[in-house]
Image: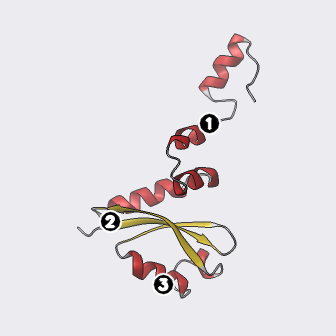
Amino acid sequence: MKKGWMYILECADGSYYTGSTNNLELRIAQHQEGNGARHTKSRLPVKLVYCEEFQRIDDAFYREKQVQGWSRKKKEALIDGMDKDLNKLAECKNKTNYKYYRRYLSGVEDEK
């Protein structure tokens, strides 16, 4: 199987686009020419801000789908190399969260 890349682009409007490819240089050039994704086409120019290399393209595609589901803050932590913050940013913060429920049962107020 071919080698693959997962990448994140920052668009001119500040939004992020996450993709995967087996030829990173060509794919970035396609985005810059307006021949990439619909999202980037109307937000040129784009800038490569992060990439990961994989031995298999299907692993890069899997990682793309994983990162696409992340919040903007979590993507920015990845881009900035702040790996220790990724777990914290992934925590559920609504009232169905197990930690919240345990605090509620014990009568401890919400931590701000």
Give the residue drawn at x 75%, y 24%: 110
**Could you tell me residue 87's position as x and y percent?**
53, 39
Give the residue drawn at x 47%, y 58%: 65
From the viewer's perspective, tell me whether residue 63 is left or right of residue 15. Answer: left
Q: Nearer the viewer, mark 1 or mark 3?
A: 3
For this orientation, the residue located farthest to the front is 81
Q: Amino acid at mark 3?
A: Gln
Label 2 packing within 10 angstroms: few (<14), some (14-19), many (20+):
many
Question: Is label 1 in contact with label 2 (beta carbons under 8 Å)?
Answer: no
Label 1 packing within 10 angstroms: few (<14), some (14-19), many (20+):
few
Q: Indicate the quadrant containing the N terminus: top left, top right, bottom left or bottom right.
A: bottom left
Task: Give the vertical position of 100 relative to 9 (above or below).
Answer: above
Which residue is identified by label 2?
57
Find the distance from the CA under tag 1 to the CA under tag 2. Answer: 31 Å
Which comes sooner in the sequence, label 1 or label 3? 3
Mark sitting on residue 30 = 3
Judging depth in this view, the residue of 95 and 76 nearest the camera is 76
Label 3 packing within 10 angstroms: few (<14), some (14-19), many (20+):
some
Which comes sooner in the sequence, label 1 or label 2? 2
For this orientation, the residue located farthest to the top is 106
**Could you tell me residue 34's position as x and y percent?**
56, 86
Task: Give the vertical position of 31 relative to 18 (above or below).
Answer: below
Q: Amino acid at mark 2?
A: Ile
The secondary element bearing badge 1 is classed as: loop
Find the distance from the CA under tag 2 to the CA under tag 3. Answer: 18 Å
Which residue is identified by label 1?
92
Find the distance from the CA under tag 1 to the CA under tag 3. Answer: 37 Å
